[in-house]
Image (cartoon, rainbow, N blue to C red):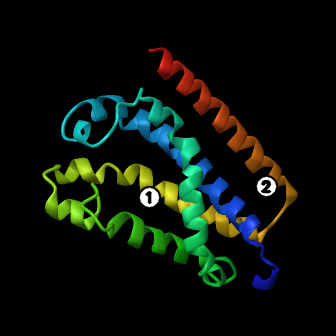
Amino acid sequence: METSDLKFSTFFWRVTSSHMITYFIMGAIAASVLNYKEMFENPPFSYLMKPIDSPWVAIGPILQVFRGLVFSVALWFFRDIILFKKYGWLKLWGLIVGLSILSTTGPTPGSIEGLIYTKIPVLSQLKGYIEVLPQTLFFSLLVFFWYEKPKKLWNVLSVILVSIMVILCTMGLIVSNNN
């Protein structure tokens, strides 16, 4: 596929749905494996994170559409490098890990700034890598291979998975509002 044939709307959907799906799946796994409920109820993370039964946490995966838009706009300018070159997925993953995880502009837990400037124990910060490194890797692979082997099946599957996620998050929002 030529980049001149690439439409932003298609790019937006593939990037956004890939992000939302991998974010939801890895978030659900991490919430269970890392026991986010307990972690977010106790310092130091209770100062940063809303409780897991918060309506905002329930609706959070749906709101990732806004991050998907930001990713799409930012990555649009690098589409030739990340979509149509050898190891494009690795270049995308390196970009995300470098700029979004390790080198944030503020002292986010797990970032270089967070490790230097926060009082959060290093091991507590590094636990987040269990979620964010695989999620961003799967995201990068999914976006790359969706362009490498485009099929209508991937479009249908992405719509189904995002729809299921929206339904589950809406149900979670309803339950959290009734508590």
Q: Residue at x 19, y 36 (%)?
A: 43
In the image, residue 27 above or below residue 153: above
Q: Position of residue 31 (x, y in %)?
A: 42, 36
In the image, residue 15 above or below residue 64: below
Q: Residue at x 60, y 81 (%)?
A: 77
Neighbour tally class for label 1: few under 14, some 14-19, many 20 plus, Cα within 10 Å: some
- Residue 167 appears left or right of 23: right
Is residue 35 visible in this depiction of the protein?
A: no
Q: Position of residue 156 (x, y in %)?
A: 82, 49
Task: Look at label 2 and name its amino acid.
Answer: Trp
Label 1 sits on residue? 133
State the image quarter where residue 24 is shown. top right
Label 2 sits on residue? 154
Is residue 129 visible in this depiction of the protein?
A: yes
Q: Position of residue 70 (x, y in %)?
A: 55, 64
Task: Look at label 1 and name its amino acid.
Answer: Leu
Task: Tell me the element at label 2.
Answer: helix
| Numbered marks: total | 2
Which residue lies most toward the right here? 152
Q: CA distance from mark 1 to mark 2?
A: 23 Å
- Residue 132 appears left or right of 122: right
Q: Residue at x 52, y 62 (%)?
A: 137
